[in-house]
């Protein structure tokens, strides 16, 4: 049974509306002023409110404004009861959040019809809200599933740590690192275009494919060959038009050489040097289109020596494409400067980076997945 709240300082109108609506099968509660009505609504949210516009104390406009600002009353349908009929007055009521108007003197058939219409919209809004909550729950479960697939921190012989913060919509970030043999470790991070499960599923597929080494005959030590094989396997024409960027590297701890290739991904940042005076910065990136975009895309390898006391950062673009409080977009250069500034100044750099990004972000949640890998070389 739908509950309707009637707010009116005229007792005779209260009684009239209560009797008429109860005959229609509704549960009706009443309030004699705006403050009392708000308290009634907060205590037991009604499906619909009929409120007089002109009352002593809080007016109907003020009551409507407060009701509509409360998230617990977001689906309550609000009807203003008024003898005012100018366009300016109606606009004022709509701006306050009123959903409908009933003119005085009250015509019963019109009132009943508007109440029925209002309750239909209330039910529709409740259904939509329930679906939204269900979708958010499913996305949160999907994010937790992705998180469960990600590797645990590594402490020896390399120190590898990571951070993964899924966006509110869940995106396509995924990463992994594992030993190909006792001397070589493979490290990669990918980012599928778009958001939602359509972006997450290809990322999980790539992770499972590489982790199981299911691509037979592939040299997993050769990054360019890995990217070529992925491009052959995940053409966007057959993957719901989804493509992804990826950075893939193989580090040999014996000769301290890192071989890498990238496909449209932000550069990995290598920061080296024993002190801030001798700090060196390298951007590790190779030319190559995102995986899945073009069948004949070519990928190339590059290699570099890793000095002692170096840190390698691999990340998705969600780490720097952040809207600041002034409305401007942060930049890759700003992110790189942050990495360099923390190299010798603090321990646990990832925590400091993450806290900085959270404070920098002007929104409650990040617009995109945020993933960062940090590899520290002794």
Image (tube, rainbow, N blue to C red):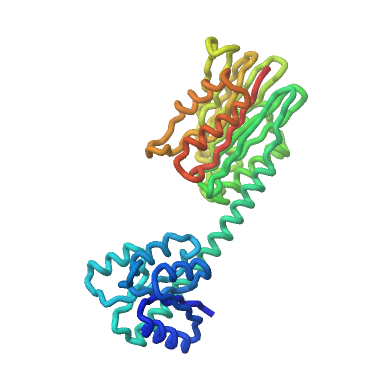
**Which one is in front, 144 or 179?**
144
Position of residue 163 measured from the top left corner of the image (x, y, whole percent): 61, 35
**Quarter in which the C terminus is drawn:** top right
Residue 194 drawn above or below residue 30: above
Position of residue 306 measured from the top left corner of the image (x, y, whole percent): 63, 16
Residue at 55% x, 50% y: name it. Answer: 196
Residue 297 drawn above or below residue 23: above
Whether residue 218 is visible here, answered yes or no, is yes
**Which one is in front, 30 or 91?**
30
Residue 130 drawn above or below residue 46: above
- Quarter-of-image position of residue 5: bottom left
Position of residue 122 measured from the top left corner of the image (x, y, whole percent): 46, 71
Q: Is residue 347 left or right of residue 88?
A: right
Q: Residue furthest front?
A: 57
Whether residue 226 is visible here, answered yes or no, is no
Q: Is residue 293 left or right of residue 215?
A: left
**Which one is in front, 63 or 315?**
63
- Quarter-of-image position of residue 260: top right
Residue at 42% x, 60% y: name it. Answer: 69
**Which one is in front, 253 or 67?**
67
Residue at 57% x, 55% y: name it. Answer: 136
- Quarter-of-image position of residue 254: top right
Position of residue 150 measured from the top left corner of the image (x, y, whole percent): 67, 39
Residue 222 drawn above or below residue 101: above
Q: Residue furthest bottom?
A: 23
């Amino acid at each position: 049974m739908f509950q309707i709240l009637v707010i009116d300082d005229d007792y005779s109108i209260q009684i009239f509306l209560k009797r008429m609506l109860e005959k229609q099968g509704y549960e009706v509660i009443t309030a004699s002023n705006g403050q009392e009505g708000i308290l009634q609504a907060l205590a037991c949210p009604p499906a619909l409110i009929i409120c007089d516009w002109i009352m002593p104390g809080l007016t109907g406009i003020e009551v409507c404004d407060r009701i509509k600002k409360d998230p617990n009353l977001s689906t309550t349908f609000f009807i203003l009861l008024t003898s005012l009929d100018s366009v300016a007055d109606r606009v004022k009521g709509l701006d306050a959040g009123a959903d409908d108007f009933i003119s005085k003197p009250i015509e019963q058939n019109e009132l009943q019809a508007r109440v029925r219409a209002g309750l239909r919209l209330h039910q529709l809004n409740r259904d939509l809200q329930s679906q939204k909550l269900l979708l958010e729950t499913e996305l949160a479960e999907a994010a937790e599933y992705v998180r469960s697939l990600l590797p645990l921190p590594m402490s020896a012989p390399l120190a590898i740590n990571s951070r993964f913060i899924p966006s509110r919509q869940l995106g396509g970030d995924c990463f992994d690192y594992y030993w190909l043999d006792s001397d070589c470790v493979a490290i990669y991070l990918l980012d599928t275009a778009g958001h939602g499960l359509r972006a997450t599923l290809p990322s999980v597929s790539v992770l499972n494919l590489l982790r199981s080494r299911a691509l037979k005959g592939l040299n997993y030590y050769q990054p360019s060959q890995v990217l070529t094989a992925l491009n052959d396997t995940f053409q966007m024409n057959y993957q719901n038009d989804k493509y992804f960027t990826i950075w893939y590297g193989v580090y040999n701890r014996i000769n301290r050489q890192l071989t890498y290739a990238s496909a449209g991904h932000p550069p990995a940042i290598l920061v080296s040097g024993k002190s801030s005076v001798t700090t060196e910065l390298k951007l590790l990136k190779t030319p190559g289109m995102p995986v899945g975009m073009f069948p004949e895309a070519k990928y190339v390898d590059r290699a570099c020596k890793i000095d002692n006391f170096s840190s390698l950062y691999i990340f998705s673009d969600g780490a720097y494409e952040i809207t600041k409080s002034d409305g401007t977009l942060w930049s890759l250069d700003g992110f790189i400067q942050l990495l360099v500034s923390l190299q010798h100044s603090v321990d646990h750099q990832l925590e400091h980076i993450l806290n900085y990004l959270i404070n920098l972000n002007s929104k409650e949640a990040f617009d995109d997945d945020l993933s960062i890998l940090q590899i520290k070389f002794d």
